[in-house]
Amino acid sequence: MWLTYRPGLAGGQVAKLVMLVKGNDHRMLSPYPGQPAPIMATAWGEQLSVTDAGDARLRRFAALYTQGPQDPEPGAACAGVGTPTG
């Protein structure tokens, strides 16, 4: 699962997103300029857009779609938390 956020998102919001991916080898986080929503969660064929990192739908999305039934590459690593630049 890939979490992206618009550069310039408040630091507290980014910190919540970091906590959602930290320690999970199948989640990653990065800024993504120009995306249509402040925060987006993406998994193979699935996407969720939210305006707040505390939105409970993000945790549900992560639980359902991290290595979920839609994943064509079960077990493939794609972890990472970059250094936010915005």
Image (spheres, rainbow, N blue to C red):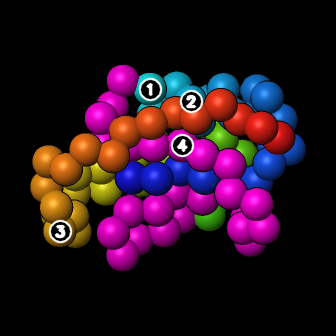
| Depth order, front residue of 57/10 | 10
Residue at (68%, 57%) from the top-left corner? Answer: 32
Q: For the residues marked 1 and 4, what is the alpha-carbon distance in whole angstroms?
A: 9 Å
Type of amino acid at the residue the image marks with label 4:
Leu
Q: Is residue 53 left or right of residue 18?
A: right
Verify CB contact (< 8 Å) between mark 2 and mark 1.
yes
Residue at (58%, 35%) from the top-left corner? Answer: 82
- Indicate whether residue 28 is drawn in magenta: yes
Which residue, given by chain and number where applicable, does mark 3 sit on?
Answer: 72
Give the structural element (helix, strand or loop) at label 3: loop
Q: Position of residue 21 (x, y in %)?
A: 45, 34
Mark 4 closeness class: few <14, some 14–19, many ≥20 residues within 10 Å: many
Which residue, given by chain and number where applicable, does mark 1 sit on?
Answer: 22
Mark 3 closeness class: few <14, some 14–19, many ≥20 residues within 10 Å: few
Q: Position of residue 41 (x, y in %)?
A: 52, 57
- Indicate whether residue 36 is drawn in magenta: yes
First in residue order: circle 3 vs circle 4:
4
Type of amino acid at the residue the image marks with label 2:
Val
Which residue, given by chain and number where applicable, does mark 4 sit on?
Answer: 29
First in residue order: circle 3 vs circle 1:
1
Q: For the residues marked 2 and 4, what is the alpha-carbon distance in whole angstroms?
A: 7 Å
The span shown in magenta is 23-48
Give the structural element (helix, strand or loop) at label 2: helix
Mark 1 closeness class: few <14, some 14–19, many ≥20 residues within 10 Å: some
Verify CB contact (< 8 Å) between mark 2 and mark 4.
yes
First in residue order: circle 3 vs circle 2:
2
Give the structural element (helix, strand or loop) at label 1: loop
Residue at (33%, 46%) from the top-left corner? Answer: 78
